[in-house]
Amino acid sequence: MSNHTDTQPPPPPPLYVFAGGGTGGHLAPGIAVAEQLRREQPDCRIRFVGSGRSVEHQMLEPTDFEYAVCETFPLNTLKRRPLPFLRSHWQAFRSACRDIGQDRPTAVVGLGGFASVPFAVAAKRCGIPCLLLEQNSVPGKANRWLSRWHPICLTFEESAQHLPGRAVSHLTGNPLREEIRQLAISDHPLPFDPPTLLILGGSLGSRQVNDSMLNAVGRLTAELAGWRIVHQTGPDGAPAARELYSKCGIAHEVAPFFSDLPARLRTATLAVARAGASTLTELAAVGVPAILIPYPTAADDHQTKNAQLFATIHAAEIVSSLDRSFAPVDLAPAMQSLLTDQQRLLNMSQQMKTISKPDAAANVSAILKSTAAFNR
């Protein structure tokens, strides 16, 4: 008689596929949720599928997450090149169906943007649960369309009114990377020694933000005395910024991209930034007041609407491009009034923190796992 007993092989570790990216604003919340899943399920596999932009490599390189590229034409090419646009998305959809059918992931997470569409649609086709993340006050076109079939996690309560009537939405907040979440839950008074001005043009940089800042610095040398400037310029602009700050005798740190942004947020007294939702979420978490320059041609003018939510509670000032052009804006009046008013900066910092939801990543993870279990 054989003593051999049949044993079932252990089930494979759960696989979560994060689809989308292209900008830091889309990618950072996905990384935050992926980190949360890894803490809760140490054996799980995480795979990001993006558009292949350099910012994806920069942000994912420090992680051990899998990374693949799914090439698609952006939405702004639809009118100019409709056939290549449709062909690229059809090919991406077929590739996504093949990958999902073969690997059978536990769930797919759509990060927003049209790079997320092929995998979100393929998940529906293959019976795999999918959860959408929306960062902005006005949901993007891709998420508005996909929310007809997949539940969606929102950063702002106001976003729900822009979704289809059948959409299932959850107000979770925008997921924060753990380093920034720790800052959010710690007692972190606004630093003033030395006061630091943080300039952020977004993950891809911004010539408009750079030029606006350099124009203002030349007029505010007296007000900036004793301040330190930390400036993320993007691929262009670093040499000009270094030259001007040195000429004006201002202590500074300038780089095209800061991979350790949480360390910069920790010491920031005031920020000048775009009004992307992920940037605003991180500033709010740490309580950094801001002067916001909304991206002039953002879809549905969503950055202006994001900024208005913060301006309404007196956490930020808005300096807009009135003609929606990329010409430099006049930052000097807003900067002058804030650089010399410590009490106002403290009040704005406190207001910033009132809008923060530091447990957003855990909220999204719980919904994702619940959705996956329900569809099992």
Image (tube, grey):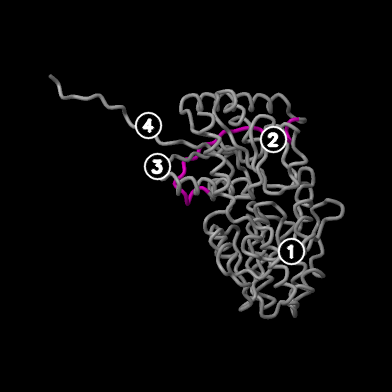
According to the picture, the residue beneath numbered tag 4 turns out to be: 11
- Residue 8 horizontal/vertical position (percent): 31, 27
- For badge 3, the amino acid type reads Asp
| Badge number at residue 142 | 2
Amino acid on which disc 1 is placed: Ala
Badges 3 and 2: C-beta atoms under 8 Å apart?
no
**Helix, strand or loop for disc 2:** helix
Q: CA distance from mark 2 to mark 1?
A: 30 Å
User: On residue 131, which mark appears?
Assistant: none
In contact (CB < 8 Å): disc 2 and disc 1: no
The residue range painted magenta reads 60-78
Q: Earlier in the sequence, mark 3 or mark 1?
A: 3
Q: Residues within 10 Å of mark 2 (few under 14, many from 20)?
A: some
Q: Is residue 272 above or below residue 203?
A: below
3 and 1 marks in contact (CB < 8 Å): no
**Chain-order first, disc 3 or disc 2:** 3
Residue type for callout 4? Pro
Q: Position of residue 238 (x, y in %)?
A: 64, 62
**On screen, residue 253 above or below 136:** below
Q: Badge 1: few (under 14), some or many (20 or more) residues near its Cα, within 10 Å?
A: many
Question: What amino acid is labelled 2 in the image?
Answer: Ala
**Secondary structure beneath disc 3?**
loop
Dividing the picture into quarters, in which one does residue 221 lie? bottom right
Residue 189 horizontal/vertical position (percent): 61, 72
Of labels 2 and 4, earlier in sequence is: 4
